[in-house]
Amino acid sequence: MSLAEITARIETATQKAGRASGSVHLIAVSKVQPNERVAAVLDQGHRCFGENRVQEAAGKWPDFRSAYDNIDLHLIGPLQTNKARQAIALCQSIHTLDRPKLATTLARLAQETGHCPDLFIQVNTGEEPQKAGVLLADTDAFVTMCRELDLPVRGLMCIPPVDEEPSLHFALLAKLAARNGLDQLSMGMSADFETAIALGATHVRVGSAIFGARTGTA
Ligand SMILES: *Cc1c(COP(=O)(O)O)cnc(C)c1O
């Protein structure tokens, strides 16, 4: 599928949901994709991309930034505290704030550098032991903690369990966000972004549907 097709499907889903045109951001997830495919999407004018590893982002995005203006880079994978400084320097948004230690580290770096990316708190809506994210019962307290640290928390993010109906998780995330006065929702991937938009997604993270299947592992 092409970027234009995905953009059109996002617009249709947005209208169907009775939402304002352009209210859903498409994060083109470029992890593990060859640079030529990423450049082709940049050449079509798209500027919003997602990477799931700091190391990989650091390897390719500085060069793209010198060649293209206004790149908006989102970190959508787990962030180790020892990579936080690098992540802040590279990314405009981080979607995977998921624990107090990372929150305090980001707050310290924000103080020191005078700058912090927009943040999403990742919620483990499926309560999966192997998955990152704050547990449901801890979410409200964690949002409060991040606010007390003056972190720019904009919204919530989730990755539903692969074998479950994603709409239940999207609806749950929307409810948690509303309860905490957060209006941005990072949810929906190639297989389910239209469902996510119907349930209020403001940021969809779409990789393979734009770039084709990933050849490496992510
Ligand atoms: C890889 C990835 C995506 C994109 O997945 P696709 O199914 O290729 O669209 C979205 N979100 C996260 C967190 C990812 O790691």
Image: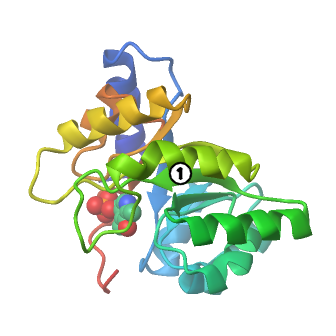
Relative image position of residue 114 (x, y in whole percent): 90, 61
Relative image position of residue 191 (x, y in whole percent): 21, 51
Is 41 drawn above or below residue 21 in the view shown? below
Residue labelled 1 has its Cβ within 8 Å of some atom of ligand 1: no
Give the amino acid at mark 1: Phe
Q: Which residue is mark 1?
A: 142
Is 157 drawn above or below residue 110 in the view shown? above
Could you tell me if residue 207 is visible in this image? no
Color encoding of the figure: rainbow
- The single residue placed furthest to the left in the displayed view is 163
Residue 155 horizontal side relative to residue 84, left or right: left
Is 143 drawn above or below residue 208 in the view shown? above
Relative image position of residue 148 (x, y in whole percent): 72, 47
User: Which secondary structure, mark 1?
Assistant: helix
- The single residue placed furthest to the top in the displayed view is 18
Could you tell me if residue 70 is visible in this image? yes
Image quarter where ligand 1 lies: bottom left
Residue drawn at x 41%, y 58% is: 134
Image quadrant where residue 213 sits = bottom left
Relative image position of residue 75 (x, y in whole percent): 55, 65
Quadrant into which the C terminus falls:
bottom left
Name the one closer to the observer, 95 or 189: 95
Is 32 drawn above or below residue 114 in the view shown? below
Residue drawn at x 42%, y 80% is: 32
Residue 60 horizontal side relative to residue 31, left or right: right
Name the one closer to the observer, 4 or 102: 102
Dot 1 surroundings within 10 Å: few (below 14), some, or many (20 or more)? some
